[in-house]
Image (cartoon, grey):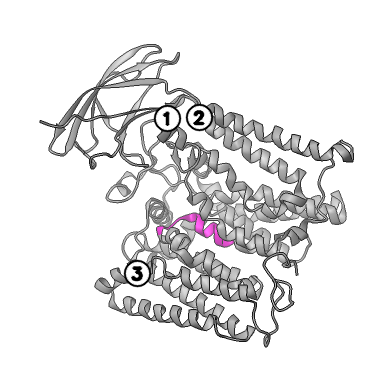
Amino acid sequence: MHLAEAGPSTSGRRAGTPAAPDEAPAQWHRVLTLLACISLFIGTRQVWVQAASLRPVVAAVISLCYAGILTTGMLTLVVRRGRALARLDLGVLVIAVTLTLCAWVMNHGGTDEAVLTMQAAREFIAGRPVYEQPWPWLFGHGIALTPTMSGGYDFTYGYPPLCLLLTAALLWIGGTGAAAATLVSTVALLAGTVVLWWLLPAQWRSAATLVCLGFGLVPSYARYGYPAVVALALLIPVVVRWPRMGGGGWTDWGRAACLGAACAAQQLPWFLTPFLLAGVYALRRGERGPRPAAVAVGRIGAVAAGTWLLINAFFVVSEPRSWLSGIMLPLTQGAVIHGQGLVGASLYYTDGSGRLAWYSHASTLLAAVLLALLVLFMRRLGPAATVLPWCTFFLATRSQDGYYLLMTPLWLAAAVTAPPSAFASAWQPRLPFGAHRRRAARVGVVALLLALPLSAAAYAVTGAPPLRMEVLAVRRGTGTVTGLTLRVTNTGGTAMRPHFTVTTNQGMNRYWSVKAGPASVPAHGSARYELLPPDGRFKLPEPGVRIRLRAFSASPETLSSTDVRLQPKR
């Protein structure tokens, strides 16, 4: 069992080695179980407060869970046998599952992803097309919009069809909002958690509860109805002990089928798949040679592709062009930049950039570079193969943290079951240098490859905003703004079609309408615009909050921003 590096040892045993049933458990095992208990407190009070007013029975169940957490926490520190602590690990899992279900009962309305999945399921049941069908009436009233660089919004379903098919099977449950869609993702998360808990070595099982259901992070995305949660659940059996893939047997078929199904649920597994296949090839080539390794990878790829195609088959036949456009939508929709990654430099710390497309170029280059580095240094980077793909999103135009944290259970699965020792014999190309120069050559190769995406990212960040905007007049009501007049000067050599919005936080508000002004500003020209807020008035924030006027354009992709400074109203 490859777990010796995973933690400190106690009582003369190596960490990670399962304790005998009658042997005293390792102290780090007690601490891990205790941390899992503590993580269940987070967010539970809010659900209890909500349930106490609306669903007293749910509130009573949550109160029993509080008692269970306290009792388990106490017993974790006093039990003397490994078997007893293993039972407490199971108790923590049961409490976590119960709390997750209670939270779903109280909050299952979902967000934009859930309502789109629900509508797609209804259209599928009715025999109508699903992809490239705009459903604008679903949005507003708390359901977020996805603005695009072209001045519009994306109202269509843009995911592979597995989640809508599963949701269609549960439409009979009724309920408010997107109950069926959020139930699919919540049940998938619970199932994935149980699978991970079962597959991990006994001493690490509470870590599965901690990462999957603790802290309230991943369960909240499940209640929002994110298809990525279903993809996560399907990837768990793939990633646990993934260095064994390609060895043959029914487990290979099962892992490959789960990988294909995950890719049919959401697009994030598309980014992980090349890294896993590269790792499998290197591991099997190190054992058997290049041809058997290629056969093993080909077998996994064929089964995964067949599973993916089987799930997509109906839509491939019934609406091939719109289906392909729909599943590629997150890559082609041209959504406005957003997230906690490098794009924040252009959003919050400068006045924009005329080179936003280079964020995408940098992200693509980084993905290719990280895959190349994994192949070149498999023995060193192999344990991080499940983390490397998500690093690329830090440079992307859409770099929200959900892309990272939703897949963190996979990090745990790899850390416990795919340690560095599993890659000791992996094949990796030999650099054409002597032994005395090989270390310097490796550093040079890494620096050269990373220079490509970093240069592209620097080029995006340092781009100047093409539009210079001057606010000439602000029409105000009581605590509101009812219109803006501004002069826009195009400093670039290309005509620009600006689309304006005003923001006071990290998100993007709806676009303002142009009451007067041209559709485009000519190169090196100026234009005067009168803008109206989307609801006729824009509510002013508290004093001291920064108000930003932003102008997006789609061709080329640019952002120009300026502060709106308000004079005290007399």
Q: Residues within 10 Å of mark 2 (few under 14, many from 20)?
A: many
In the image, 34: left or right of 155? Answer: right
Taking the image as drawn, is residue 55 in sight? yes
* Mark 1 secondary-structure assignment: loop
User: Does residue 216 lie above or below 128 as drawn?
Assistant: below
- Tag 2 near tag 3, CB within 8 Å: no
Q: Position of residue 219 (x, y in %)?
A: 45, 63
SS class, disc 3: helix
User: Upstream in the sequence, badge 2 or badge 3?
Assistant: 3
Q: Is 229 covered by the magenta stretch?
A: yes
What are the residue bounds of the magenta stretch?
224-235
Tell me the quadrant of the picture where the N terminus can be found: bottom right
What residue appears at the point 75 percent right and 62 percent down from the top-left corner?
A: 244
Quarter residue 42 falls in = bottom left
Residue that carries the numbered disc 1 in the rendered image: 350
Task: Give the amino acid at mark 3.
Answer: Arg
Q: Residue 457: which disc? A: none
- Residue at numbered disc 3: 45
For the residues labelled 1 and 2, the Cα–Cα distance comes to 9 Å
Identify the amino acid type marked 2. Val
Instruction: Look at the magenta stretch and give its main secondary structure.
Output: helix
